[in-house]
Amino acid sequence: MVAVYTHVSAEALSAFLARYDVGELVSAKGIAEGVENSNYLVDTTRGRFILTLYEKRVAADDLPFFMALLDHLDAKGLPVPPAIKDRDGREIQELAGRPACLIKFLSGVSLSHPTPAQALAAGEAMGAMHRAVADFAPTRANSMGVETWRPLFERCGRSLDDIAPGLYDDLGKALESVLARWPGDALDRGAIHADLFPDNVLMLGDQVAGLIDFYFACTDIRVYDLAVMHSAWSFDAQGRGFDAGVGDGLIAGYERHFPLSAFERAQFNTLASGACIRFALSRAWDWLNTPPDALVVRKDPLAYVRRLKHYDPELVKRSA
Ligand SMILES: Nc1ncnc2c1ncn2[C@@H]1O[C@H](COP(=O)(O)OP(=O)(O)OP(=O)(O)O)[C@@H](O)[C@H]1O
Ligand SMILES: N[C@@H](CCO)C(=O)O
């Protein structure tokens, strides 16, 4: 697990907080979870906040889209963490040479092993989020969308076989099969989260207390968001042990807002296979380009190849 990439001194943090109406600094601790950004838990005389400094994976130009989406969802009563505005109304700042936001703290814990009841609540929360963005105008292309998969596969190249023998052939065939079947514009599109893994949902018992980490949010197929969630929630960390109760719970919860059409149901496994390819490829790229002794724990690409095999057993022959 990484801790924090960018160190912020107490003096710099106090000066930063002075731009806001949030009281004075009491304490700040680096948060170990998370691999994309540097996060601090900040307590002031007026409350608790998250300070996020955006590292290289989040483009500064994308922050206005993410913050507008969070403001929109917050205004509609969804449990998301908007950025706090400073006295001049600004949400996006610079601190220690990085883009930075002070963000509302949400209670709740992220789960490692969700239950069907928790999956039902989380699926319902995703449906509510998709309902709430019906009148959200800004758009952002999916930086990990379907058009990026073949180029990323080609950049990984034959080195994929260093991860597991046969992975290059398996992923290459799966990719072409999924691209040929991809429903594209035939399905409803909108703003989606695109990375709603269990660690990005904060729960209190069986209630959803927070949806966080919107830094892959984009405009894409609405049910693809549910397929990403299904592939992330319904298996163990190794990508084995499919839990139909959790998978069905997610879909049943979502359907309280958006019943799936017969066409969406028919496309679901293709969308989920696409999600598996997306995460297998991004993890494979990181695996091949992160030294084994780096501070970051590399996420296992094969856990996603196994999930792919679940959705489409014909696609994976050798590598999982
Ligand atoms: N608004 C918030 N309220 C409470 N806790 C938060 C909030 N935002 C983040 N956290 C905590 O910080 C951790 C890391 O946050 P986040 O997932 O956004 O980081 P990240 O660096 O983008 O990581 P990754 O993409 O790997 O999930 C979360 O697991 C959660 O514990
Ligand atoms: N959720 C992604 C990491 C990017 O947030 C994964 O598990 O591969």
Image (cartoon, rainbow, N blue to C red):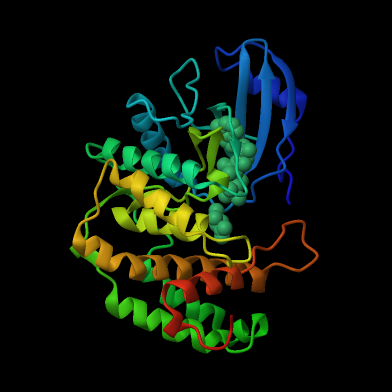
Along the horizontal axis of the image, is 186 left or right of 288? Answer: left
- State the residue at coordinates (35%, 69%): 269
- Is residue 96 in view from this perspective? no
Residue 293 is left or right of residue 143, and the answer is right
Q: How many labels does the image show?
A: 0
Q: Determine whether, in the image, residue 2 is placed left or right of residue 272.
A: right
User: Camera-side residue: 134 or 24?
Assistant: 134
Looking at the image, residue 266 lies above or below residue 105 = below
Q: Quadrant of ligand 1?
A: top right
Residue closer to the observer: 74 or 67: 74
- Residue 297: percent from the left, percent from the top? 72, 59
Residue at 67% in and 25% down: 42
Q: Quadrant of residue 18?
A: top right
Looking at the picture, does residue 265 appear above or below residue 7?
below
- Front residue of this view, candidates 189 and 89: 189
Q: Is residue 232 visible?
A: yes
Q: Which residue is drawn at 56% across and 32% down?
A: 205
| Residue 242, percent from left and from top | 52, 64
Q: In this view, does 91 lie above or below 54?
A: above
Q: Residue furthest front?
A: 245
The correct choice, above or below, for 94 with respect to 293 in the image is: above
Q: Position of residue 14 (x, y in %)?
A: 69, 19
Left or right: 144 with respect to 114?
left
Where is residue 320 shown, x and y percent of the image? Answer: 59, 80
Residue at screen point 51% across, 39% down? 212
Q: In which quarter of the image is residue 267?
A: bottom left
In the rendered image, the residue lying farthest to the right is: 293
